[in-house]
Amino acid sequence: MREVPKRWIWTGAGAAALAAVGVGGAALERRHMQRIESDPENEVLRDPPAGRPLEVRSADGTTLHAELFGPDDGPTLVLAHGWTETLDFWTYVISDLTREGKRIVAYDLRGHGDSEPAVDGDYALDRFGEDLEAVLEAALPDGRRAVVVGHSLGAMSIAAWAEHHDVAERASAAALINTGVGDLVAQSLLFPVPAFAQVVNRTIAVRGFLGARTPLPRVSTPASHAAIRYIAFGPDATPAQVAFYERMLVATPPDARAKIGIAMSELELHQALERLTIPTVVIAGEDDRLTPPSHANKIADMLPDLDRLIVLPDTGHMGPLERPAAISRALSKLVARAASADRAVAE
């Protein structure tokens, strides 16, 4: 397992930042860090579960880092995280489901965490679909299938995979969490503007946010924390949960972050949904500004085999961090339904 930052480091850039903001600013900074350190969730999130490493080679030669959790004979779920996250994003869900005897396979998307940057810099969504196929092939024993679960970009990866692969051969069910498969900029609530200004809005969203290559500050500040909370979280997220994601965000290489962001801004995968012919749960956050519930509603309407549509109240874009118990329950029920369907076919 990678070495997870336990705290923001107050040397070098941190010391310079404190010096720059002066005495008053330094006091605010200390209080900010104290709120994070004193949050009970900090103890959980500073020590993610360690899995058994699995190296995966994708179709284009990009090497992906995956980890296996739980018993080898349990029902398998494959977890794909979102943009600017790592497999540690699933910390709560992995802990919940392995306690139930589930076998979990989580992996870092290309350009994230311990996975390699994309060969030839290729971050097209089709490549993310090929990555999922490679993980399934490497992690599943012959004849077994998995429940595939994606958050945000991870769910887009499932759609991209479904478009070009035999879904039912590898997967028994799917869960699409906090995601969209097209019109991401047009439907975003991040920069709400009147209809006549949508062209300007798209420019701001793509160049100033999704496609920005500017390195991010290595030190958490009250301002950066507040911005990330506004963009990605609902009202109930704790300081440690926001900081946990902030560490993943700043660790994502700027070039990969920007290229993937631009690829997502051009995404159009609605046509792939008709190939996702397995029971599928769609989960949205009521207060998600990045992929609001309108995306989930459209996906649910287009799926051939919708299991359930769940809209979580007071929840932003980070459902598995903000509402892990609800997400874990939904996934456990999905696994049980998939197993029941398999038994019925076998009989």
Image: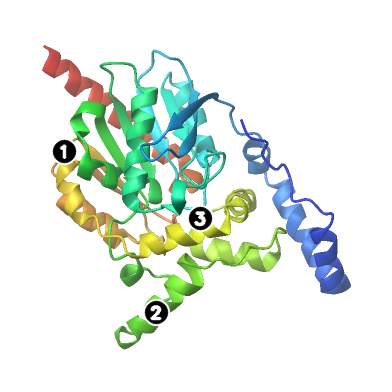
Farthest residue in the front direction? 120
The quadrant of the picture occupied by the N terminus is top right
Quadrant of res 27: bottom right
Q: Which residue is mark 3?
A: 256
In this view, the residue in front, 226 or 136, is 136
Q: CA distance from mark 3 to mark 2?
A: 23 Å
Q: Which residue is mark 1?
A: 277
Residue 17 image position (x, y, % from top left) = 80, 66
Q: Do we see residue 14 in this rendering?
A: yes
Q: Do we see residue 290 in this rendering?
A: no
Residue 14 image position (x, y, % from top left) = 80, 59
Q: Which residue is mark 2?
A: 201
**Disc with the residue nearer the chain's start (2 vs 1):** 2
The amino acid sitting under disc 1 is Thr
Q: CA distance from mark 3 to mark 1?
A: 31 Å
Q: CA distance from mark 2 to mark 1?
A: 35 Å
Q: Secondary structure at mark 2?
A: helix
Residue at screen point 48% across, 36% down? 63
